[in-house]
Image (spheres, helix red, strand yellow):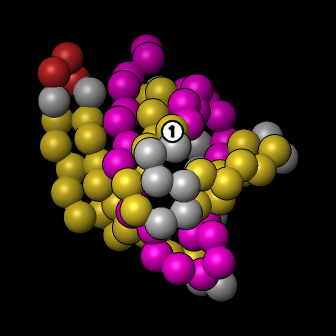
Amino acid sequence: MSQTIETTTSVTVIHGAMLSFETVAGDAPERTREHHETLLRVIDGTITLEIDGATRELTIEDEARIAAGTPHRLSSASGREARIVQEFRRTS
């Protein structure tokens, strides 16, 4: 399945943190945010999160924290769209 991650809104909030609201459909390539810790929360649907070879399925209201510099991959579970909000905080 091809990648589709659409960012609908990004805003900078207190102390330089940034919020990003995204729609995930399909499989995304592996990505790494070298200088940002990520807090990901599912707000609609189900996603699969792969970190260091371990896979977790996250549903509505589930969260995951991804340390800066950690390779990870997102995909929508069962091919259906999912919506997430991510908070990025600079670590260095």
**Residue drawn at the location 58% of the way across and 61% of the way down:** 47
Q: Is residue 10 left or right of residue 42?
A: left
The residue under label 1 is 63
Determine if the magenta segment contains residue 76: yes
Residue 40: image x %, image y %? 46, 42
Residue 79 figure quarter:
bottom right
Residue 15 figure quarter:
top left
Towards the viewer: 9 or 82: 82
Q: Is residue 26 depicted above or below 34 in this figure?
A: below
Q: Which residues are magenta?
A: 64-92
Q: Is residue 68 depicted above or below 4 in this figure?
A: above
Indicate the secondary structure of the residue bearing disc 1.
Answer: strand
Towards the viewer: 11 or 80: 80
Q: Is residue 91 depicted above or below 57 in this figure?
A: above
**Residue drawn at the location 35% of the way across and 36% of the way down:** 87
Residue 11: image x %, image y %? 16, 43
Q: Residue furthest right?
A: 53
Residue 32: image x %, image y %? 58, 43
Quadrant position of the C terminus in the picture:
top left
Amino acid on which disc 1 is placed: Glu
Determine if the magenta segment contains residue 59: no
Towards the viewer: 82 or 5: 82
Tell me if I can see residue 27 in this picture: no
**Residue drawn at the location 23% of the way across and 64% of the way down:** 8
Tell me if I can see residue 52 in this picture: yes
Residue 3: image x %, image y %? 55, 76
